[in-house]
Amino acid sequence: MNTLTNRLALPALLLTGLTSASFSAHAADAAPKRVLVVTVTTGFRHSSIATAERILQKLATDSKAFTVVDLVQQPNTVVPRKPNAPRALAPNADEGAKKRFEADTKRFEEAMAKWTPEVDAAAKAAQEQFNKEAAASLAKLAPAELEAKKIDGVIFANTTGDLPLPDKEGFIQWIEKGHSLMAMHSASDTLHGFRPYIELLGGEFATHGGQASVELNSLDPAHPAAAGLPSPWPIAKEEMYHIKSFDRSRVHDILASATVPMDGRPEQGQPAHFPVSWVREQGKGRVFYTSLGHREDVWDDDASLPNRLNGPEVAKNYQKHILGGIRWALGLAEGSATPQVK
């Protein structure tokens, strides 16, 4: 190769090298984020959890934005639950409510007749075993484990109760260092006794009425968690949560109803800011929450799903909603986290 050829070839080689380096850097940047999905419950367990696990895995596979490194699932031990007495009748209860109360009371009395001391002892032993298994499963959320496996974020999909996390304070600090928490439905009915979690999430479940129809307004249509959603977004039937410990000056609202959509509650239909989904930042960490996700047909867009009350389009929109929220929380899509209300 002569001198002139060398001179011409050198810039080309440098350009090729720079292009390869740029491509490698881009490929590294585009590597899917690593996520844990947690579905452990120590309180009420939703029948939609198996559906949630499957849909989250599908969104990961189809979007290639994240990969589900592991599922942190429920222990195998089944704990018999002592029957709960029905709630007392409201003073203004109608005849229908009175009949339901009578039927519920009869079922409760029949169940209590079967709750012998032997059954009670077996339930306590099963509870101890369940607690051990739950703690072992949730050990994956120890900060050192999360760091070792290079986990970018954790999804709490319909978790409930006082989860025995190995290091609750450490988990909050891990989020604040630049990781993410993505939470659906009853994740707000989780860790009520641990205020740092409630403060991180931005609110907690207070109560709900019967499943109701609702129209949701997008309060930031440009945000990834709302992109592509109709506004208003009608949902035929869903369990809508009344949220407490909520301060609009600490969150960026994504979805809300302009009236209270809690069927059978005295406040049903009254004008209100009824929060449903929001995002927030804490330290360098990002948090996305939506109270939607009670029903299988909110998660799953399969038209042949039995007992559908919501059409497949509702589930397709829900999947857009949570995928956008996940992408934002993982830092893969930009959107505001500034509270709209000071």
Image (tube, rainbow, N blue to C red):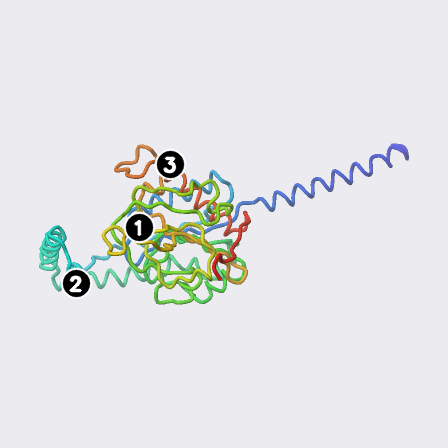
Residue type for callout 3: Glu
Please name the residue shown 28% across and 39% down the image. 309
Helix, strand or loop for disc 2: helix
What residue is disc 3 on?
313
Q: Mark 2 to mark 3: distance in Å? A: 46 Å
Dot label at residue 120: 2
Q: Circle 3: is it few (<14), some (14-19), or many (20+) Cα within 10 Å?
A: some
Q: Determine if residue 72 is in view.
A: no
Q: Mark 1 to mark 3: distance in Å? A: 20 Å
Residue type for callout 1: Pro
**In the foreground, 21 or 136:** 21
Please name the residue shown 33% across and 33% down the image. 303
Number of marks drawn: 3
Position of residue 246 measured from the top left corner of the image (x, y, whole percent)? 39, 61
Earlier residue among tags 2 and 1: 2
What residue is disc 1 on?
261
Mark 2 or 3, closer to the camera:
3
Helix, strand or loop for disc 1: loop
Position of residue 73 measured from the top left corner of the image (x, y, whole percent)? 36, 52
Residue type for callout 2: Asp
